[in-house]
Amino acid sequence: MIRGRWVRLADGRGGITATVMTSANAEDWTWLIDYLELNVNLSSVQQSFPADEHMKRAVTECRGLRLLKQEPWECLASFILSSTKQIVQIQQIVALLCERFGQPVRSPRAETWFSFPSIDRIAALSEAELRCCKMGFRAPYLKGTAEMILRGEVNLESVRTMDLATARAELMRFPGVGRKIADCVLLFAYGFQQAFPVDVWVLKAIKQLYFPRRRPNGKKILRFTESYFGPNAGYAQQYIFHYMRTRIGRVERRGNEKN
């Protein structure tokens, strides 16, 4: 589901093929181009990366990798639900939330999918209803965030006009939102390319690639990422993140083959 449309994306020889599976007008693809950030000059972004061997390998391994520009509320809510969860578990929570409380979107093939629940819908639910979606302690965080937005305590649209530090602080007013989640939302919903989310995988990657013989603390890692990766640090983060995950996966598969 992308901005109210059920879209099927397929990787083809000439690039990505998109098919809108609903009756919505598919003549104007601006919304999908914006979502996939196809207007971003990827070559220029990559040229802004540090010219070290690790970034060069990451770019080679992850050729063509782009960020998404998601809807702010859905992005914020999804990252709140992601705290201390693995990807498969996050997908299950979000799927349950959409099925139970989202709006049905039907296709000409009589298939049904569900949109992400609106801010109003989430705010109106009880914590018990939210916990039924297997989100556990995150339920009051999600409900509290929706209520804050409805009360006008935080305006998600106004975040776009702020500088990075101010925008980060504004998002961190929400319950359950620390720096990592705030930076994820700034990067994936608002296009703040300087934002560099540091999760467990990225922290491990930075230490292994750039501090192999030292043990930097969290503050030093943050200072390093803020100054080293340049104006498109968020893009660099994704290349490092995906590179390390795929490289570790290859190492594990080779180890299993030898065994």
Image (cartoon, rainbow, N blue to C red):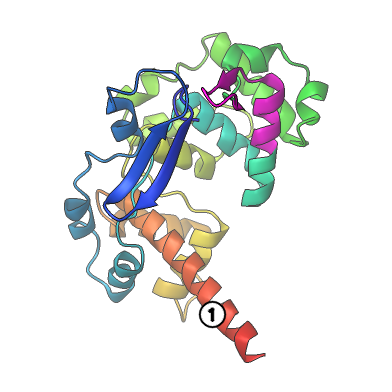
Whole-percent x, y for residue 207 in the image: 47, 70
Would residue 96 be seen by someone viewing this image from the given angle? yes
Which residue in the rendered view is the most extreme toward the bottom?
258
Q: Quadrant of residue 223?
A: bottom left
Q: Circle 1 sits on which residue?
A: 251
Using the image, determine if residue 198 lies above or below residue 119. below
Q: Position of residue 94 (x, y in %)?
A: 64, 35
Does residue 69 appear in this view?
no
The foreground one among 113 and 210 is: 113
Q: Residue at x 51, y 22 (%)?
A: 108
Q: In the structure shown, which secondary structural element does the residue marked by tag 1 occupy?
A: helix
Instruction: Return the residue nearer the eye: 78 or 38.
Output: 38
What kind of residue is marked 1?
A: Val
- Image quarter (top left, top right, bottom left or bottom right) of the C terminus: bottom right
Residue in the picture at 42% in, 66% down: 243
**Image location of residue 47, percent across then percent down:** 18, 59
Q: Is residue 224 above or below residue 247?
A: above
Q: Which residue appears at 63% of the width and 29% of the height?
A: 175
Q: Which residues are magenta?
A: 93-112
